[in-house]
Amino acid sequence: MSDAASVSGHSTNKAGRFVYVSGVVLLCAWVLIPLYLLLVNTLSSPEAVNSFPKSFLPGFDLGSLEFFAGFSGMLVALKNSIIVAAITMVLSILIGAPAGYALSRFEFRGKEVFRLLILLTRAFPLPLLALPLAVLFIRTGLDDTAFGLALVHTTLAVPFAVLITFSLFSGIPLELEEAAWTLGCTRLTAFTKVVLPLILPGITASAIFAFVISWNEVFAAAVLTIENRTLTAFLLQTLSESPLHLKFAGGFILVVPALVFIFAVRKYLFAMWGIANR
Amino acid sequence: MAVIEIKNVAKRFGEYQALQDINLTIEDQEFMVLLGASGCGKSTLLRIICGLETATEGEVWIGGKRVDHLPPKDRGISMVFQNYAVFPHLTVFENIAFGLRMKKLPDDEVTRRVERTAGLMHIDQLLQRYSGELSGGQRQRVAVARALAMEPDVILMDEPLSNLDALLRMEMRAELKGVLAESNTTAIYVTHDQVEAMSMADRISVMHKGEIVQAASPIEVYRNPAAEFVAGFIGNPPMNFLPAAPAGSGQWHVAGQVIEGPQVDRALRFAVRPEDVRPAETGLTAVARIVEPLGAHLLVTCDIEGEMFRAVLDSDLAIRSGDKLILAPQPDRVRWFDPETTKAVA
């Protein structure tokens, strides 16, 4: 955009730059201001959060976070969230990475359809599936367990795991594997000695993304668990009766890991979208 | 110490016949070049020998052992790839040592072999670098060193020089030839570059549309092409062809001239290389169309009875576009082809 503007003269150049810069500023503000307010209120004392007028500078008071940690059930919910997300992470890589490898390395009938179907799993809204799932889970005894919820989260995360690992494997020339085969490797040792070291950072990214998907998911968590609620479901449940500073602290605890992780793996997400857009 | 025998090998990709009925024996320590245009099946044949591709039909024997059902690692071969395939997560040292470590050789033997082959390929200064820190030429050296360090019976190379620039390619060509001659391995080298093929090979197999058209020494392929395809593919500029009509008892009408040829009673094609004609008093009447001075020679593209004819002449000759030339073909260099089978006629 700035390239085109620089060709068409000084005044349009200036105007183009103005639009560009203000666009960037607006988008950043849209994302950053709520985050900032969240941060300010989390790091203020409960009294400051509930008082008026509000301060726009954080008080660096851990009162709200202490209250959050002390709130009954909150730490258990946090632990549940981590367990479910960890199981989701492991399962979606175990299922997604081999699928991604197969998509990138083998030619088989229905490959394109399969790729489309993977995306289509995201086309069904979870509320539609929630009731049948709940019934099924109660029958099989999976209801209200971390594993059961992780299964649902895995189905949500697998499409992304497949697409990310597919693009990772596609980025590794087949010739590297072939060279390993000619140098004494079997298919398996070529994978572990050559492919795996090369895609490990990407696999980690994909795993983290699965973790974040599970971490952020609220609907299935709220429907399928009662005692063993995850943090999102627990916060949703207590939202109406809990004090303001608890909401802020909970929101902050939810947002920060997701934000940090996504920021860390952004390079690989772009790669996935680049492939998915084709 | 390995003779390679390829017996009745065919390869189909679905409906597409990539290779048909390939029979070829490559002698121990021979340097065989598979030469052909892209899509002729030369890489497929190499990959079948290597074990990266399976033949639809036929057998591959290496060193008296049938190998077509063995994985690449059990065939006693090493391969050099077009894109080098140097492992980016390993140093040059570990790249060259990779296969040796897979063989579980003792550390001192690994070090000895790596240092020897690295010295041979002049990369002993680069052993601690990663592939990303190397130039294309250096990467190619690593790939060759890695293949040589395995001390294989057979070394297979798939267009190893085609990603290098022209000057480097010429340099590497000579070096590779020297290194391979000393290593006593049988080598199969795939290329589409006829200069590479001519300069390196003990024998060239010219491939076309999934078949081997001719397998012979470079000079034989050049002087006595077995088919029109070979004549037109090898040589720059390639061989000239003109229609010939029988004039009885081994005499042939070619562009109004009578030329001696084989005793056959059907129409043939007359062929001669551009450098095997000279301006003379009698001969083929040509009109010069394009004159290209190349320094050492003059490349003249002319017109003989509507057919294009190229001549490589002495650069001292003053020839301009539109000039009439009389070109006499050197009699012992004239070849004849059957237009129906496109095969050479003696």
Image (cartoon, grey):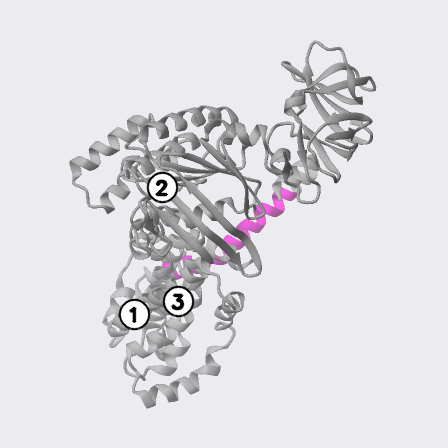
User: Which residue is pictured at 38% across the width and 43% down the height?
Assistant: B4
Chain of the residue where label 2 is placed in the rendered structure:
B
Q: Is residue A270 left or right of residue A193?
A: right
User: Which residue is pictured at 76% across the width and 30% down the height?
Assistant: B252
A165 over A240 or under it: above or below: above
Q: Amino acid at mark 3?
A: Ile
Q: Nearer the viewer, residue B11 or A114?
A: B11
Q: Nearer the viewer, residue B262 or B15?
A: B262
What segment carries the magenta color? A16-39
At mark 2, the secondary structure is loop
The location of residue B129, given as percent across then percent down, is 31, 33
| Residue marked by disc 1 | A87
> Magenta span: helix, strand or loop, mainly?
helix
The location of residue B146, given as percent across then percent down, is 32, 37
B122 over B346 or under it: above or below: above
Q: Is residue B9 left or right of residue A258?
A: right
Inter-mark Cα distance, 3 to 1 = 12 Å
Label 2 close to label 1 by CB (< 8 Å): no
A87 over B58 or under it: above or below: below
Chain of the residue where label 3 is placed in the rendered structure:
A
Which circle marks residue B3 in the picture?
2
Check residue B311 for magenta coloring: no
| Residue marked by disc 3 | A213
